Amino acid sequence: SFMPKSAGAATSGLKFFLNSKTGSYAISALGGLHPVLTASVATRVNGRWLPASKFPHRVVTKSEVIGMLGKADEWTITYSGLKDAPELIYEVRIYRDAPFGEMQAITRNTTTKTIHVEGFRLIDATGLSIHGGTIVDLAGPATEDRVLSASFSEDEPAMQVRDLANAEKKMHLGIGTQ
């Protein structure tokens, strides 16, 4: 089950929840009945995806930090113990006085071999949310949910606003900030 992790002052507008069994997370609006987003993280190493749920060990630490938007609560979740695999680390920062957060993923090589990190998924979301609904719940009709998918280039292919269900190659791509 999801364990609430306090996101600081009530003025921030965001709450962060962590499922300690699966490693997945949820982010909700302050006072919201359901999470806005339910997902997990993953890293692609040596041609294979390593989702957080595959790692047998998880360590969670929380600290108070000062970020670009002021005081924030920051969680660092370290996944380890997967045979012949590096550690997967992600950091979640929720600002206390602004309705914003940041996420970052790190792959730390704890093996004795060279690894090739090929990608990260900060929002690795498939299936249903923890409440059996959609992964993204923007509190409106799902048919009206939209996302601006990016590309590695600003002009090729042209960026488009798409329905969440209309993802190119079954994935919405976020480069930089989305």
Image (spheres, grey):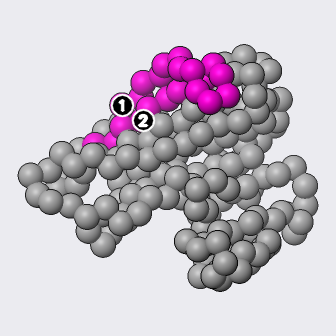
Q: Amino acid at mark 2?
A: Ile
Q: Is residue 63 left or right of residue 17?
A: left
Q: Amino acid at mark 1?
A: Val
Measuring 55% from the left and 71% from the top, which residue is drawn there?
Answer: 152
Q: Are marks 2 and 1 in contact (CB under 8 Å)?
A: yes
Q: Which residue was labeled with disc 1?
A: 59
Please say whether residue 110 is one of the residues in the magenta stretch: no
Mark drawn on residue 77: 2
Q: Is residue 135 above or below residue 30?
A: below
Q: Nearer the viewer, residue 177 or 41?
A: 177
Measuring 62% from the left and 30% from the top, which residue is drawn there?
Answer: 68
Q: Quadrant of residue 11?
A: top right
Q: Is residue 175 left or right of residue 104?
A: right
Measuring 49% from the left and 58% from the top, which residue is drawn there?
Answer: 121
Q: Residue furthest left?
A: 112
Q: Is residue 145 above or below residue 95?
A: below
Asked if one can make out residue 46 in the rendered structure from this viewpoint, the answer is yes
Q: Which residues are magenta?
A: 59-80
CA gap, disc 2 and disc 1: 6 Å
